[in-house]
Image (cartoon, rainbow, N blue to C red):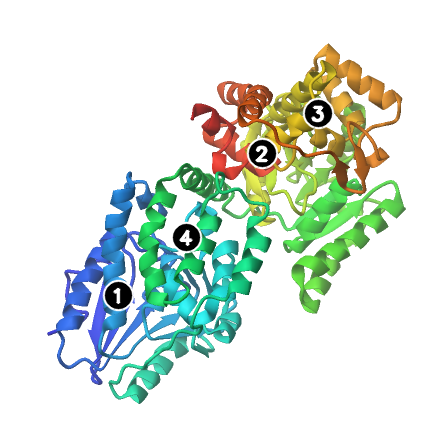
Amino acid sequence: MLNSDSRNDLSHWSINIDDDHIAWLQIQADGKSVNVLTHAVMDELAILIDELEAADNLAGLALLSGKPGGFVYGADIHEFETLKKAADVANHMELVHGLFNRIEALAVPSCVGIDGIAVGGGLEISLAFDRLFVTASPKTKLGFPEINLGIMPGYGGTGRAYGRIGTKAVLDMMLTGRPVGSKDAIESGLADEMVDSADDLAVAMRAWMLSCNGVKPARSQREATADASAISAARDSYLKRARADHTPAPFAIVDHVAAFGHDSAAMSAGEMGIFPELMVGDASKNLRRVFYLTDAVRKSARGDSGIQRLHVVGAGVMGGDIAAVGAMAGLDVTLTDMNEAAIDGAIARAAKLFERRLKTDDKIAAAKSRLRADKDGNGAGDADLIIEAVAEKLAVKQAVFQALEAASKPDAILATNTSAIPLEDIATALKAPERLIGLHFFNPVPVLPLVEVIWSEFSDQNKVNRGMQFAGRIGKMPIRCKSASGFLVNRALLPYIFKAIEAVATGENADLIDEALVDFGMPMGPIELADQIGLDVCLDVGVVLGIAPAAKTLLTEKCDAGTIGRKSGSGFYDWDGNRAIRPRQPQDATIMAGIVKSMLAPMIDECQQAVDDGVVDSVDSADAGMIFGIGFPGFRGGPLNWAKS
């Protein structure tokens, strides 16, 4: 006989049997802010399923979350690290598959009510029930994000989702990792019924179960066999730019659906032969490291910065985009520049950004209203934070901050977007140098997530903390850095670029260097990147940070000739718009590996030195900064992590 919720032997679940003989389960993972499927949660679920199977008077089974605002966020990723071998993973999967299969096989109708997030294992447990109810809340999201961890769904979700929504939709879900909202879930067949709010779930679920009269509904597989054209399209869309030796999961997912499309149950079972090897592989280990780094960075940016009004000085590409991102995040923003046309251009660019990102007319209009042209710079007087984004010249920045200090509130934070100038040098112009911090954004600001939050020996650490929180508020990933030449990213990136330029200057092939690094997983090679940045900019920064004579000579020659990279149409490469014209011919793998090791050596050395010098807090911060700042391949886990391996 099933026990009621008065029982005290459960920590993560409660159960109540109502007068209609419906069993209501609630999951509330103990000690967790949100529901996750820990091993302990699964152990208790096994006890409950034993009782459910033994009950002789059950009319239905319903599952809800006992934590408001969310359903189940999946497995506990930290527990993945306890499963060291593929056999350990397989044993755990066998346990969970068995539990979910038993839920699916219960002789009574079953349903689940989802309000909030149901992703990964949270969606997989839901799919074991006969009917999925979702709320219309925009926060309700269903998805399979496992690809971001280098794996695939592993609790039977591949087959159960395939059976409901078919080849194309399930491949899109698994290969993108993007969740779907309630309306899309209903339209695709992933979910069955939508209610207005969480308060309506139990009523709708009860009504459906009573209408079944104890008879379990039948569900047929949506497609009799996998759609070959959808599989071919997925290979073209998702695999052409991927590498199975880099990230095997997307290839495994497509092959899995192709192999088992004849039978959704076989597809679920087939996970057992693929998932364990993926999870213990290097790509998944390193992508899980990126997950932990991301989580740590986000936690470092939590809290209320107290910043509502932002004033940006400098309406060039960087300043204009910083202002736009601030307005898009809900801040009141004023933008000033000596050139009124630059302000107008920046606001026009911002309007296009709002239209791309915000979609709805009301949100676009609200963002536009929050971003105001301010030719006279009056917004500085009311701002909580002022960001300077003017020319990278010390004297110019000192003059700007002298004026801003006089015009601003005494408690306003003054921040510079300098990419290399030590804050101590800028702060000499201030009467209160403790007000100055650095907020170094990366171009393009709307795309690149990293912000280096810089502190100097003078900086008020409370203002530094508020800078971290501000970065989090606008959706960025902040890394705290001590003021030092090049901070973290430029300190490590530029010697890598200069090393490659020096190699070209001494006779090595530029395309071969670039192809080796792209083959390694970098977004582009160091020579092409130099062309993108501008060889004139590289030379100017090299003079400040240091550059080998051969590289300096070559850059000087190219700058004198006016061939300064993409913006001039020619540099190390000729350019067709935004595309470098180069052969892109891979060579022998051993040769390529040797080039990678040689080219990355300066980057690795500088990252380690930044840790040793206290420029960043830890190896984790250094790796996170390079992943978020330059796109160092996540499946490598960061430069220091890769070097260690």
Using the image, tell me which numbered label, if any, was put on residue 388.
Answer: none
Q: Secondary structure at mark 4?
A: loop
Give the number of the disc on residue 510.
Answer: 3
- Front residue of this view, candidates 279 and 356: 279
State the CA–CA distance, disc 1 to disc 2. Answer: 42 Å
Q: Which of the 4 image quadrants contains residue 253?
A: bottom left
Pick the front one: 628 or 582? 582
Alpha carbon separation for disc pair 1 and 4? 19 Å
Classify 154 as above or below 524. below
Tag of residue 519: 2
Q: Nearer the viewer, residue 328 or 560?
A: 560
Image marks 1 and 2: residues in contact by CB distance under 8 Å: no
Seen in the image, is 552 located left or right of residue 25?
Answer: right
Q: Position of residue 281 (x, y in %)?
A: 38, 39
Residue type indicated by callout 3: Ala
Is residue 335 visible in the rendered structure shown here?
yes
Badge 3 crowding class, 10 Å Cα cut-off, few under 14, some 14 to 19, many 20 or more, is many
- In the shown orientation, is residue 496 left or right of residue 49? right
Please, what is the three-letter code of the amino acid marked with disc 2?
Asp
Q: CA distance from mark 3 to mark 2?
A: 14 Å
Gap between marks 2 and 4, in whole Å?
24 Å
* Residue at mark 4: 152
Q: Amino acid at mark 1?
A: Asn
In-image side of 238 versus 299 (left or right): right
Percent from the top left, x then y, of residue 444?
A: 70, 42
